[in-house]
Amino acid sequence: MGGLMQIVIPSPDQAIENGAFTTQWVNFITKVKNYISGNSQSGTTAQRPTSNLEIGTKYYDTTLGYPVFVHQVKPTVVWHNAAGAVV
């Protein structure tokens, strides 16, 4: 990943709409959580996350026994291993 991740803070007046956090703030909070936790999660191949992902997001795949990384998010999520092979 190497490099600092830029996190843009939405304005406070955009935080709540109709009694709930706005999508903009949910995305911001998710990015902060991922940054603080080292952007890593773990589970089986079938449990890999499919939303709120960024290129470089790390996931320890217990089915494969090694970490995989998000290589592409659109039009579909593509994961690869440290050698660059799609998994």
Image: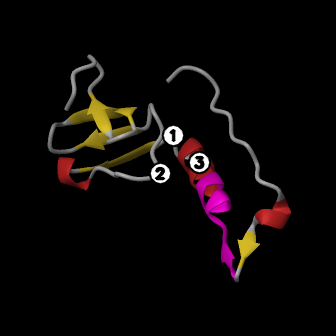
* Nearest to N terminus: mark 2 or mark 3: 3
Which residue is denoted by mark 3 in the rendering? 31
Which residue is denoted by mark 1 in the rendering? 38
Task: Tell me what residue is drawn at x 26 percent, y 26 percent.
Answer: 81
Q: Residue furthest left?
A: 63
The stretch drawn in magenta includes residue 22: yes
In this rendering, the answer to whether 18 lies above or below 67 is: below
Q: Secondary structure at mark 1?
A: loop
Range covered by the magenta-colored residues: 19-28
Q: Quadrant of the C terminus?
A: top left
State which mark lies toward you, 1 or 2. 2
- The x and y percentages for residue 41 are 38, 48
* Nearest to N terminus: mark 1 or mark 2: 1
* Nearest to N terminus: mark 3 or mark 1: 3
Q: Residues within 10 Å of mark 1 (few under 14, many from 20)?
A: few
Q: Residues within 10 Å of mark 2 (few under 14, many from 20)?
A: few
State which mark lies toward you, 2 or 3. 2
Which residue is denoted by mark 2 in the rendering? 52
C-alpha distance separating marks 3 and 1: 10 Å
Q: Which amino acid type corresponds to the residue marked 1 in the rendered image?
A: Gly
C-alpha distance separating marks 1 and 2: 15 Å
